[in-house]
Amino acid sequence: MAFAGIVRKTLGPYYYSRRLNIPNLFANFKEYREHDNWSREQLLAYQHEQMKKMLVHAYRHTKYYRELFDECSFDPEKYKSSEQLNQLPILTKDIIRDRLDDLMADDIGENECYDSFTGGTSGVKMQFYQDLVCRSRRVAMQWRSDNWAGWDPDTTVAYVWPAIQDLMENPGWKHRLAVKYITRNPIFYAGFMDHERAARIKEELTSVNPTIIRCFPTPAVTLLEYVADNRIDLPNLKGVITTGEPLYPHQTEAIEQGFNAEVFNLYASREFGTTAAECAAHKDLHIAVDSVLLEITDRGRQLPLGQHGEILITDLHNYAMPFIRYQVGDYGQLAEGDCSCGLNYPLLKNVVGRASDNFIDADGNTIVAISLVLHLVDNGPKVGQVQIVQKSVAEVLVRFTPDPIPDESVKRFYEEHLMRSVKGLQTVKFDIVDKIEPEKSGKYKFAICEIDPQEIRRLRA
């Protein structure tokens, strides 16, 4: 065993538990790996058991859910199926900001949990809490999905990462040693890219020789575009895990060619960690039903299998601050059938958009804008980065980066398709910009709706 592997095996449990406050991580990882051998029935039975325990706990130990369940005449002790959740309203970020204290469980002390923040696409911070047991399970769940991409606890995951809040400023020598020998997760900032930074990231990636790269798709493609030969050869690289923003087919192709490795799509968030992940079959995403309950809904009502709708998530393990039917703002659909890989986790597909990124037509109908952008980019003429902004029901602005500069045929293609897709659209304008800036969270918004919410409500009335 290599020296780093010996150090990690010997000191890893202590370091994660005592220094990072992540107890029982290796035991939790072993448990979740065993779930990979479970049948669909076993997985769903475990999910049901954990869901009922969470509902009962939330009622007994949080003021918010006690009031909510009583108001809705919802008895968690009589919970039998997820359809009963239709009785409960959605948990939103605004509710969490307004009633944070009432959402905290009264049986878990401050020293048993930690706080975190999510900015989301709006850039507005939302504070939330997780207990330490949940935190450990989140990391173990990430390890499991990384394992599907070829990772094991003795290998290195390098982050090509645009979220500057995840970087440690001036880390000390102890932290640097831990990253090198124990956590094995060096981070390379990719929120800004030029030739000098791209060359430095390439050199550092070659130096650490990772087994897995975790990245946002857009910064990864931008890095590869800056590399002179459009290739970064890493002999031990087994996979590239993309997360944080929608993954387009042309990005998958560019990343696979540039890193000479398979690309695995991951659906995750700061609130829940790994929610669904792609396996080696590269079909749909396996839902971590032993960690969350994921619903596909329309205005809070569950939709049948195969229909596209808004995603609501319930956390099965965060007892410090229960998240029940939380509105993440994404859209997707549950896929039918089983995966050829042999894993029995239910499948999720077509995860697109954010609620704030959807377009609205003249009748008030919702158009999943990311799906529209994906169609235009992947089926249209070659363009650089694209961002589409709906200024009003009647007007859309399309921004392109000049790589290449779009000619009249490109503009005509976009105008014709947008006019057909958005009822009431009258004007499509175009703007060439040097760069489409990411948000504070590091994510790129490919679609933006600027229509006033009151106008949307009027259209839907």
Image (cartoon, helix red, strand yellow):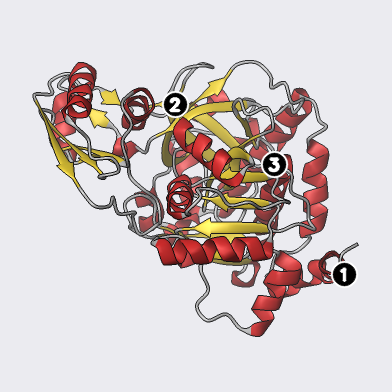
Mark 1, residue position: 10
What residue is rendered at 69% in x and 41% in y? Answer: 149
**Mark 2 to mark 3 CA distance (whole Å):** 30 Å
Image vertical order of residue 229 relative to residue 204, above or below:
above
Judged from the image, the secondary structure of the residue bearing numbered disc 1 is helix
Give the percent coordinates (x, y) of residue 31: 81, 46
150 vs 343, nearest the viewer: 150
Mark 2 or 1: in front is 1
Please indicate, yes or no, whether residue 28 appears anywhere in the rendered image.
yes
Mark 2, residue position: 297
Give the mark nearest the N terminus, 3 or 1: 1
Circle 2/circle 1 CB separation < 8 Å: no
Mark 3, residue position: 149
Q: How many marks do you count on the picture?
A: 3
Left or right of 319 on screen, residue 122: left
Left or right of 438 on screen, residue 251: right
**Mark 2 to mark 1 CA distance (whole Å):** 46 Å
410 vs 15, nearest the viewer: 410
